[in-house]
Image (spheres, grey):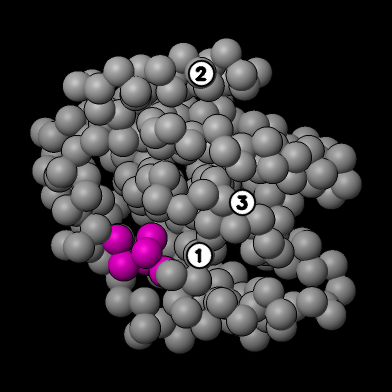
Amino acid sequence: MGKVIAISNQKGGVGKTTTAINLSACLAEQGKKILAIDLDPQGNMTSGLGVNKSAQENTVYELMLGSCTIKECIIKTNYNELDLISSNVNLAGAEIEIIDLKEREKLLKNEVDYVKNDYDYIIVDCPPALGMLTINAMTTADSVLVPIQCEYYALEGLSQLMHTIDLVKNGMNPTLDIEGVVFTMYDARTNLSAQVVENVKENLNVKIYDSIIPRNIRLAEAPSHGLPITKYDSKSAGAESYRQLAKEIIERK
């Protein structure tokens, strides 16, 4: 059975979507069968994997509203072993539209369960908010991976995220686990990055991945070309760090 990992942090700009795209690509590169689900109305995971988000008829929005099946939503990407359920701006209205639906917290889970056995990993890119879309991701997920930017306010809001994970675990998904924390945008030239890493290790009783994602210009450029870092610059420090993260996650499963 596939493992569902939600990538979540309600703070924007922490490398969440970059991690979702490149972890998916690196797991696929390792020969794992991957389904990437873009649950962010910005649709950046979709475009970052080279898919035209405005041209898709069946997206995660239609899926959650019940107007198509999950198999009608799944599209092939240009990469072996990597499928996608796309997103676009229509999803922004979903939080309001699903408010009266029965079991609204489990709309995504009820669909993903149909295909969970078809994949080794299902990677869900959450929006930068702790609303109903993120709740849906967490009720679907086996674990939550939290990217943390190496900056001064890194811990701000994390207690709220952990509280939300606990609420979902206690009320809707008792097997939900915190996959761990991965540090992003690490700048080896500054003391601050090292201090943030130490601060998080001291304050959070969670698994912290050895792989640290550096601040890397090639990582920043790749999405504008619609490519994961493994295709944009396979030998870059960013590509190697995400490969290491993928290996750690595979070993942990």
Q: Where, by quadrant of the figure, is residue 216 drawn?
A: top left
Q: CA distance from mark 1 to mark 2?
A: 29 Å
Q: Which residues are magenta?
A: 43-48
Camera-side mark, 1 or 3: 1
55 in the magenta segment: no
Q: Which residue, given by chain and number where applicable, does mark 2 sit on?
A: 199
Helix, strand or loop status at disc 1: loop
- Whether residue 186 sits left or right of residue 204 in the image: it is left
Q: CA distance from mark 3 to mark 2?
A: 36 Å
Q: Amino acid at mark 3?
A: Lys
Q: CA distance from mark 1 to mark 3?
A: 20 Å
Q: Residue 54 placed where, x, y %?
A: 37, 83
Q: Indicate which disc, 1 or 2, sits on the residue closer to the N terminus.
A: 1
Q: Mark 1: few, some, or many residues within 10 Å (few <14, many ≥20)? A: many
Return the residue nearer the eye: 14 or 21: 14
Return the residue nearer the eye: 33 or 45: 45
Disc 1 + disc 2, Cβ < 8 Å: no
44 in the magenta segment: yes
Return the residue nearer the eye: 77 or 131: 131
Q: Mark 3: few, some, or many residues within 10 Å (few <14, many ≥20)? A: some
Q: Name the residue at 50% across, 65% down.
A: 40
Q: Indicate which disc, 1 or 3, sits on the residue closer to the N terminus.
A: 1
Q: Residue 178 placed where, x, y %?
A: 64, 32
Q: Which residue, given by chain and number where applicable, does mark 1 sit on?
A: 40
Q: Residue 233 placed where, x, y %?
A: 12, 43
